Amino acid sequence: MHTLDLLEQAITAAEKLGYRVRREWLGGGASGGCEMGGQKWIFVDLSLDSHEQLMQVLEAVGEDDALKTIPLPKSLETLAQRSRKAA
């Protein structure tokens, strides 16, 4: 499966978990997951390549215990497990 497809699936999964996702040009600066005003956010840095963007999303949701409560496509589940082990 192509990285862009996996990225879209990861963003969809994040949204199902209650994250709001913003894609912005951050120039390699601060990006990833955070919480503001009681809302979970993921900032995806458009200056990074699609694989790095995918890893940003997976790292942000990988720490969320609720990730176990939603079904993931097999290819995305494998990447999410790798991301959790690497963290």
Image (cartoon, helix red, strand yellow):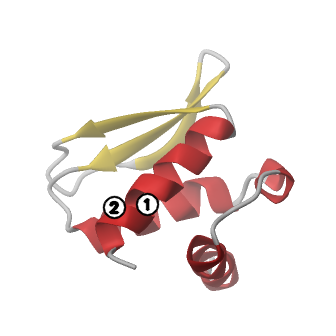
Q: Position of residue 75 (x, y in %)?
A: 57, 79
- On screen, residue 5 versus residue 57, left or right, reads left
- Residue 5 appears left or right of 65: left
SS class, disc 2: helix
- In this rendered view, identify the residue nearer to me: 26 or 14: 14
**Gap between marks 2 and 1 measured at Cα:** 5 Å
* Residue situated in front as seen by the camera: 26 or 50: 50
Question: Circle 2: is it few (<14), some (14-19), or many (20+) Cα within 10 Å?
Answer: many
Residue at (66%, 62%) from the top-left corner? 62
Query: Which quarter of the rendered picture does the N terminus lie within?
Result: bottom left
Left or right relative to 80: residue 56: left
Image quadrant in which you'd find residue 81: bottom right
Q: Position of residue 22 (x, y in %)?
A: 35, 34
Question: Mark 1 falls on what kind of element?
Answer: helix
Numbered badge on residue 56:
1
Give the x, y percent position of residue 14.
Answer: 58, 45
Q: Mark 2 sits on what residue?
A: 53
Task: Please give the name of the residue rendered at 60% of the width and 15% of the height, measured from the top-left corner.
Answer: 37
- Which quadrant, please, contains the C terminus? bottom right
Amino acid tagged 1: Gln
For the residue carrying disc 1, how many other residues have a C-alpha within 10 Å: few (<14), some (14-19), or many (20+)? many
Determine whether, in the image, residue 3 is placed left or right of residue 6. left
Asked if the residue under mark 1 is in contact with the one under mark 2, i.e. CB atoms within 8 Å, the reply is yes
In this picture, is 36 found above or below 72?
above
Instruction: Identify whether 36 is placed above or below 33.
Output: above
Q: Nearer the viewer, residue 29 or 44?
A: 44
